[in-house]
Image (cartoon, rainbow, N blue to C red):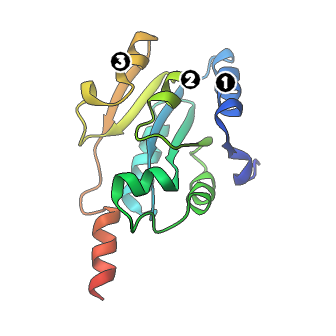
Amino acid sequence: MEKSAEKIKNLVSAKELVESWKRKGLKVVFTNGCFDILHLGHVDYLEKARSLGDKLVLGLNSDESVSRFKGPNRPIQDENSRAHVLASLQFIDLVVFFNQDTPLKLISELLPNVLVKGSDYLAENIVGADVVKKNGGEVKTIEFVPGYSTSGIIEKIKKT
């Protein structure tokens, strides 16, 4: 069994791995996010994303990009902690960081067969959708488990 740390790769290594999977005929699914405090909603979403293919690649926002996106008090957990926790999940095959505001560069380099985001996005508005479709791939959305969000959990903790 692969150790979780071995699933965390830089872009160059990730691209080589994804290309090797594709050569073997495996369907590669890509999703991305901050995943600051892992909760049931995340696990459900990621497990459903993995069911859409043979391998799941997770683009993980770096600490710097999380702060730009979520504010100066985020992330709660540093990027290495988040990456290791996510890589320990059996249905995640690869974790790769991105420091940009969007994962467009990552998606353009990896060219997954399936691009997935939550149903709060319209498929046509998902960053990288055009790149994936142009390359013959598909774009899917997944319903969230109601009542679970990192921001909601943080607010609940603040009230206690």
Kind of residue at disc 2: Glu
For the point 51% across and 67% down, which residue is it?
77
For the point 46% across and 11% down, which residue is it?
135
For disc 2, the marked residue is 109
Disc number placed over residue 21 in the picture, else none: 1
For the point 61% across and 22% down, which residue is it?
26
Sooner in the amino-acid sequence: mark 1 or mark 3: 1
Residue 113: give x, y in percent of width and height: 49, 21
Find the distance from the CA under tag 2 to the CA under tag 1: 14 Å
For the point 44% across and 29% down, which residue is it?
104
Residue 115: give x, y in percent of width and height: 42, 29
Q: Which image quarter holds the C terminus?
A: bottom left
Q: Name the element at disc 2.
A: helix
In this view, the mark in front (2 or 1): 2
Above or below 9: residue 134: above
Kind of residue at disc 3: Asp
